[in-house]
Amino acid sequence: MTERPSNAREALSRIEKDQVKWIDLQFADLLGSIQHITIPAQMMDERSFNKGVNKLDGSSIKGFKEIHESDMVMRPDPTTYAIIPFISAEHKTARFIVDIYEGDTGVRFTRDPRYVAQKAAAYARDSGYDTTYWGPEPEFFVFDAIKVTPTPLSARDAWGGSGYEIVSREAPWFHDGGKELPIRFKEGYYPAPPQDTLVDFRNEAAGILMEYFGLRVDAHHHEVATAGQCELNLHYSELVPMADSVLTMKYVLKNVAKRMGMVCTWMPKPVFGDNASGMHVHQSIWSSGKNAFYDPSDDYAELSQTGRYYIGGLMEHARALCAITNPTTNSYRRLVPGYEAPVFIAWSKRNRSANIRIPMYERGEEKSKRLEYRTPDPSANIYLAEAAMLCAGLDGIKKKIDPGNPVDRDIYKLTEMDRRELGIRELPGSLKESLEELETDHDFLLPVFTKDLIEMHMELKRDEYLNLALRTTPYEIYRYMDI
């Protein structure tokens, strides 16, 4: 693992030392997808870091700019320097994650997701918490192939139908003449090879993350679902570096899968009848080296009153948060009972049927005291998701929002009357519903998010929902063709 450069001069020295020929400038668009532009290494100088690289057409990036205001500037962050191992040595390429600036005024672009995360970290500092720690756990699927019969993009393109087929050597529906041992539905957690066929894939990806990108990998393993569901855990870090790391991890895993003849997807629920992919997010806030969530005198969970208020904020805004933490129509195929996904808004220690859990692996450990917010999924833009959760939690502290009593029962088994008596609300059942919640409940975001960002996010997501609602699905044909 190589030391990261800390400033422009060190970064330029590394470019020369490593004999880099090309520089890949990467950033996340508003939806969280990685975008990039590549420039010759000899074009990089100190001015590139201080004034920026004038190469971005913001009107071509979804959610960024209109065509009449498209010129934007990218400033590389020297600390994100890394050699890209997927590109041949003949074209040796290094990447930087960049910050986006307005082309004419030189001010930060308000809808740059990384800027939102940076503002969230500053908001926490202004609120008295100089450090926030984050540990997302994004799950994902790795398939041998996905075969898609194209969906019509317009009424003129009505090709007569659409559908898909997932190919996975681990799946019960895969036919290979008995050479593979399938993983049954919901029995994919921790099986050893030969059933776990993806150990080499995960080892390769983890090794690249550590060796080339300087990230710390805690563990990786197969997940509950059949057909190649996995999880790879990065060591917790502060808000912006952690978001950078998740962006990097998605980039690396997709490229490793491609090189090995497979496909990696962060779609939450690609497989009907089995568990979907979540992204549980561990988080804590600190002040002057002290964990604000930790109280050793608390008998229930060693959780401070500050921690309870933070939970109260997350619970108060949980339904609106879904529009950011669960931002696709497919996200709501996951948020249903029966598949370990958190459907209900409640908190507890250890209880995985609540959407907020206080891990209790050990007592008396200040550094490990945290909460786990279990609602998000990996389709979220990690920069926006972390920022939004922090805003909700800090709003809870500011307003002293009481989260109520913890629920130490299996919420899935409670009757509707039981849940009503306990004051347990449900998360939204669709993207449309979550967007309606965000429309009426977004003031808690405004210390960090601008209104134009929220409005653009809602516009893009409403368009996604509408386009899905307009199209007939294969199941609808199956269900209604005999009417």
Image: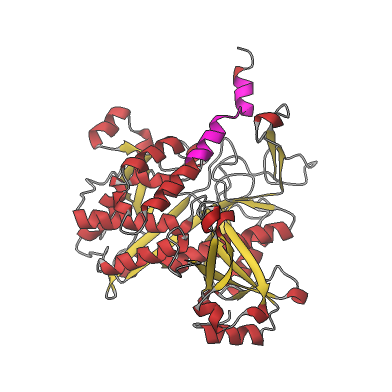
Name which quarter of the figure residue 231 lies in.
bottom right
What is the residue that sits farthest to the top in this orientation?
Answer: 483
Q: In x, y percent, where is residue 8?
A: 53, 83
Q: In x, y percent, where is residue 425?
A: 31, 37
Q: Quick check: is 26 in the magenta stretch? A: no
Point 53% across, 65% down: residue: 72
Residue 182 falls left or right of residue 210: right
Q: Say whether residue 146 is visible.
A: yes
Image quarter hosting the N terminus: bottom right
Query: Looking at the image, is 411 positioned above or below residue 290?
Result: above
Q: Nearer the viewer, residue 427 or 68?
A: 68
Residue 422 falls left or right of residue 249: left
Point 66% across, 78% down: residue: 41
Q: Nearer the viewer, residue 282 or 427?
A: 427
Query: Looking at the image, is 338 positioned above or below residue 408?
Result: above
Name which quarter of the figure residue 365 lies in.
bottom left
What is the residue that sits farthest to the front in this orientation?
Answer: 68
Q: In x, y percent, where is residue 3?
A: 54, 82
Part of the protein shown in magenta: 462-479
Image quarter hosting the C terminus: top right
Query: Looking at the image, is 228 positioned above or below residue 121?
Result: above
Q: In x, y percent, where is residue 307?
A: 26, 58
